Image (cartoon, helix red, strand yellow):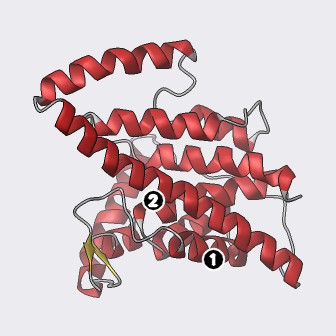
Amino acid sequence: ALFFAMEVMVVGEIDYEALFPAFIGAFSASYTSHFLGLEKFSVEITQSMSINNFKSMLLVIIIGLLFGLAGRLFSFSLAKLKEIFKKKFENPYKRIGFISIILVLGLMLFQGRYSGLGTNLIDLSFHQGTIQIYDWLLKLVFTIITLAIGFQGGEVTPLFSIGATLGFILAPIFHLPIELCVALGYTGVFASATNTLIAPMMIGLEVFGGHQMIAFLIICIFAYLVNGNKSIYTAQIKNF
């Protein structure tokens, strides 16, 4: 939260003047939520991989690029779908009202699997439950439609969910530890879709521990590089 606040508004520039107020805000929110009984999400990653040869480095770079493309697909599609819906339904109430009917029917068709923030899919991914090859894509589609018609909030955790499920699918394809690949996807898609670099690295450190920090660093770098300078936050300033 601390680093995200400093880098999300202006791409290519970190506002260090905001360091102290961001520090107060981030840790105050953390301690307050802890006091109210809302525990932080964390997973102890027991699996590991060595990145000391060209092959393993190449594999990590490739999945980093794939996570980046997923994040880019999310941010690009969200922007385009917002434009389309605004042209089709100039009245925001009609836009939300009419399209919500189709949205609800679609969510009911899958028995609510893609409703909410996606924490159910995150839990299934980390505990090696049943994840379908299309879960990440359908979660992406339903989330984009929900946001594009005018509902606000709930972008971040769905991005974690999309990345985690995509990581689950990619792990056996690239012969990587499933739990670790799920964690890498959790941070990589977020890095790409939000057009941030340091914050997702810190998420990897805070949520999953530091013993695989090099892998998280590589994933976030290449996911960030491939995102095409797109972001889910339209107010984000590109300072170059």
Residue beneath the point at 86% across and 50% down: 172
Q: Quadrant of the N terminus?
A: bottom left
Judge whether 212 appears above or below 172 on screen. below
Any mark on residue 160, and which?
none
Left/right placement of residue 85 relative to residue 48 reads: left
Front-most of 44 and 151? 151
At label 2, counting other C-alpha atoms closer than 10 Å, the crowd grade (few under 14, some 14-19, many 20 or more) is many
Judge whether 53 appears above or below 64 on screen. below
Residue 147 found in image quarter: top left
Q: Which residue is mark 2?
A: 193
How many angstroms separate mark 1 from mark 2 (CA)? Answer: 16 Å
Residue beneath the point at 65% across and 61% down: 66
Residue beneath the point at 75% across and 46% down: 169
Residue 39 is situated, as x and y percent measured from the top left of the image, at: 51, 45
Check disc 1 and report its element: helix, strand or loop: helix
Front-most of 201 and 149? 149
Front-most of 30 and 164? 164
Q: Earlier in the sequence, mark 1 or mark 2?
A: 2
Amino acid type for the residue under numbered disc 2:
Ala
Amino acid type for the residue under numbered disc 1:
Leu
Residue 236 is situated, as x and y percent measured from the top left of the image, at: 26, 67
Check disc 2 and report its element: helix, strand or loop: helix
Residue 68 visible in rendering: yes
Any mark on residue 217, and which?
1
